[in-house]
């Protein structure tokens, strides 16, 4: 392969490189005789592995596959030695995706709490980054749970979809008496607010729920439609006191 200044190419191999120039004098690497090519590589994503290498004093760097380079210069220094200076560049499209970027979403505090759900009466899940996906998991458990009486979901972002799912759980749950939803985002618009859809779903649940006595919605911006729906629900709800 010929390298000309300005050319771009993809390095597909997993290659061992070094920051130690002394290593290059060894015959098994670059040596001093024969036709040789030395790549001078400027790379942002090389992996320092000298702490894990058998050759700890060589400052070994692992060049990862799918690295995109541009040739900056080439030089023939004589004695059959060519030096090619390449610099990592941004590829025009994704060449390789890290498997770490596709790992499923997890919420460790929620997972720990869920394991104790059937043996506790109070669950504190405030300010743990609970989103719509987390809420969907939680509400499925709430539909059949008979031990939990207090649930704190304040300071999260459960969105419209999560709020509606939670409302559906409240329609069938007969154990939960206290629910904290303060400072939340029960909307898809961002901020601490309860949208028309979130408010109406919650209102529908309150019309049929006969267990909830305390509902905290402080720190939210309830939309006009959501507020009206909640007000109508309170006219028929006989158990909510706070």
Image: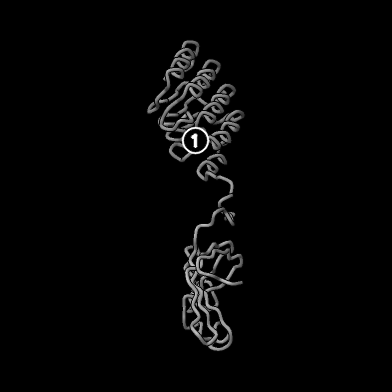
Question: Among all residues in the image, which is located at the extreme top?
Answer: 235
Colour mapping used in the image: one colour
Is 162 above or below relative to 37? above
Q: Nearer the viewer, residue 76 or 222?
A: 76
Classify mark 1: residues with Cα within 10 Å, few (<14), some (14-19) or many (20+): some
- Give the mark count: 1
Q: Quadrant of residue 80?
A: bottom right
Is 50 above or below relative to 176? below
Let me know if residue 219 appears in the view: yes
Is 83 above or below relative to 163? below
Q: Position of residue 41 (x, y in %)?
A: 49, 70
Q: Position of residue 147 (x, y in %)?
A: 56, 30
Question: Among all residues in the image, which is located at the extreme left?
Answer: 219
Q: Quadrant of the C terminus?
A: top left
Q: Quadrant of the N terminus?
A: bottom right
Element carrying mark 1: strand
Q: Quadrant of residue 220?
A: top left
Q: What residue is drawn where x is 58% and y is 49%?
A: 103
Q: What residue is drawn where x is 48% and y is 71%?
A: 73
Is 218 above or below relative to 65? above
Q: Quadrant of residue 181?
A: top left
Let me know if residue 47 appears in the view: no
Question: What residue did someone put label 1 on?
Answer: 123
Q: What residue is drawn where x is 54% and y is 24%?
A: 167
Q: Position of residue 125 (x, y in %)?
A: 47, 37
Q: What residue is drawn where x is 54% and y is 54%?
A: 92
Q: Position of residue 145 (x, y in %)?
A: 59, 30
């Amino acid at each position: 392969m010929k390298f000309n200044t300005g050319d771009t190419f993809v390095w597909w191999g997993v290659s061992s490189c070094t920051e130690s120039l002394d290593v290059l004098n060894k015959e098994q690497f670059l040596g001093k005789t024969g036709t040789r090519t030395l790549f001078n590589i400027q790379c942002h994503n090389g992996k320092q592995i000298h702490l894990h290498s058998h050759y700890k004093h060589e400052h070994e760097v692992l060049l990862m596959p799918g690295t995109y380079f541009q040739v900056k210069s080439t030089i023939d220094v004589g004695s059959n030695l060519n030096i090619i200076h390449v610099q990592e560049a941004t590829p025009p499209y994704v060449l390789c995706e890290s498997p770490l970027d596709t790992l499923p979403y997890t919420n460790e505090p929620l997972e720990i709490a869920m394991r104790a759900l059937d043996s506790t009466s109070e669950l504190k899940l405030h300010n743990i980054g609970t989103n719509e996906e987390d809420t969907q998991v939680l509400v499925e458990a709430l539909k059949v749970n008979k031990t939990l009486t207090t649930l704190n979901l304040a300071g999260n972002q459960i969105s419209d979809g999560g709020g509606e799912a939670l409302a559906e759980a409240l329609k069938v749950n007969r154990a939960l008496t206290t629910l904290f939803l303060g400072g939340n985002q029960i909307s898809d618009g961002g901020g601490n607010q309860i949208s028309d859809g979130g408010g109406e779903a919650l209102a529908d649940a309150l019309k049929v729920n006969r267990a909830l006595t305390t509902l905290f919605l402080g720190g939210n911006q309830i939309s006009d439609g959501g507020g009206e729906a909640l007000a109508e629900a309170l006219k028929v709800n006989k158990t909510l006191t706070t």
